[in-house]
């Protein structure tokens, strides 16, 4: 009886670890620079070469580090992912930006539908460009994101096209009455402008927060009325989702939105044609914090910092689904802002980054 209890207790612990400790899947670690530390000393203490740290961090001046600056330290050996309850190989492939065939090949998986909770998957080094999903088999949509960006160069944006040391923080899925105000407090404290893509039905419930976003000098964009995948609904519904949100936000702010981020960043040729006809600029991203999934500060920093480059557009969320905590996002922002400034970046709104009008 005692053995059975210990067995079930062990199983319970494993399940808890799988569900709540994202570091099991980390491909790197976080180091916060101490006063007086040099890059050489940090590399020595971690047992790696300076070049490995430079390869993981876009340091404009590697000879100048600042106390509290965050460095991402690459981990030796193969990166792994621990399969969690509800995972599928397709889902893991999509989230990590690794082609499913490469993932299956790396792990000698003959049956792509057969993976087990707790299984350690080796991750191949192949990774898609930030913000651009990897090609997946049997997709119903005929163009990749990068192809669509080339087809609609004056409508669809993933990042800026110049080489200035500017970046744009963007926040999706708000507003709410809990996390959006906390994020606004942090942005005000650090004097950072940002762009908020708001869901229409949430804006209708929280008009005071919408007004506060605008009053603090941030830009407001359209994120649809109810957050559907716009590729999978009729064209009439796409137009309704956009215009209903536009009209609601105009009623609150007096401004007509000209920037839109499609839910999930999901676009197709047909969706972009509708956006163009409605005089919208479609803003996706080049850096995904994955803060909706990874609710731990270090992992969000690991997801974000290595992919930042000149004129990057960074994706975060200022609200989540029902009962979903965005507390880790709130905790991450001060360190992220300070580190990016240490690295020589300045913050602007998306319209300033891309030199396009924010409103109609």
Image (cartoon, rainbow, N blue to C red):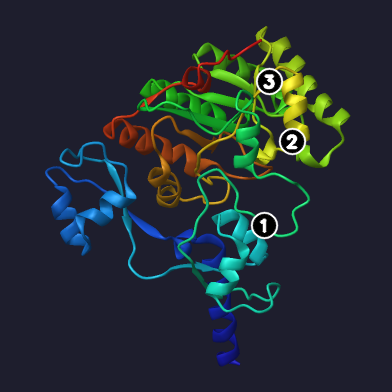
Q: Work out how far the residue at label 3 is from the one at label 1, CA to CA, in angstroms.
A: 28 Å
Q: Dot 1 lies on which element?
A: loop
Q: Which residue is the site of mark 2?
A: 269
Residue positioned 60% across, 49% down in the render: 133
The answer to which of 334 and 28 lies nearer the viewer is 28
Q: Work out how far the residue at label 2 is from the one at label 3, CA to CA, in angstroms.
A: 14 Å
Q: Which mark is residue 136?
A: 1
Is tag 2's residue or tag 3's residue first in the polypeptide sequence?
A: 2
Depicted 11 relative to depicted 133: above or below: below
Q: Quadrant of the N terminus?
A: bottom right
When asked about the image quadrant of residue 102, the answer is bottom right
Q: Dot 2 lies on which element?
A: helix
Residue positioned 66% across, 62% down in the render: 90
Residue positioned 51% across, 50% down in the render: 295
Q: Which residue is the site of mark 3?
A: 280
Q: Residue furthest top?
A: 254
Q: Quadrant of the C terminus?
A: top right
């Amino acid at each position: 009886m005692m053995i059975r209890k210990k067995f079930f207790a062990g199983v319970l612990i494993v399940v808890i670890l799988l569900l709540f400790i994202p570091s099991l899947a980390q491909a790197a670690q976080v180091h916060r620079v101490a006063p007086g530390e040099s890059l050489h000393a940090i590399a020595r203490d971690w047992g790696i070469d300076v070049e490995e740290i430079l390869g993981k961090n876009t340091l404009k001046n590697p000879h100048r580090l600042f106390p509290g600056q965050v460095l991402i330290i690459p981990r030796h050996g193969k990166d792994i992912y621990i399969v969690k309850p509800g995972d599928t190989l397709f889902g893991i492939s999509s989230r990590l930006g690794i082609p499913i065939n490469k993932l299956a090949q790396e792990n000698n998986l003959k049956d792509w539908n057969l993976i087990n909770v707790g299984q350690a998957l080796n991750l191949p080094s192949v990774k898609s460009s930030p913000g651009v999903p990897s090609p997946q088999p049997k997709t119903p949509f005929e163009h990749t994101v990068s192809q669509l960006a080339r087809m609609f160069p004056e409508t669809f944006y993933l990042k800026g096209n110049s080489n200035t040391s500017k970046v744009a923080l963007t926040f999706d899925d708000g507003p709410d009455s809990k996390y959006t105000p906390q994020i606004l407090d942090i942005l005000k404290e650090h004097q950072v402008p940002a762009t908020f893509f708001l869901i229409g039905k949430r804006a209708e419930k929280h008009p005071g927060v919408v007004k506060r976003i605008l009053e603090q000098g941030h830009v407001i964009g359209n994120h649809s009325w109810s957050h559907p995948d716009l590729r999978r609904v009729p064209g009439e519904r796409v137009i309704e989702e956009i215009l209903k949100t536009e009209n609601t936000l105009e009623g609150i702010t007096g401004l007509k939105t000209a920037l839109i981020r499609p839910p999930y960043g999901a676009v197709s040729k047909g969706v972009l044609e509708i956006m163009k006809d409605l005089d919208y600029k479609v803003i996706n991203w080049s850096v995904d914090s994955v803060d909706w999934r990874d609710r731990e500060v270090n992992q969000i920093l690991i997801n974000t910092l290595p992919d930042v480059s000149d004129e990057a557009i960074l994706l975060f969320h200022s609200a989540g689904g029902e009962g979903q905590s965005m507390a880790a996002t709130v905790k991450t922002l001060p360190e992220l802002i300070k580190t990016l400034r240490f690295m020589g970046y300045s913050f602007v709104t998306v319209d300033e980054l891309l030199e396009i009008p924010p409103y109609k």
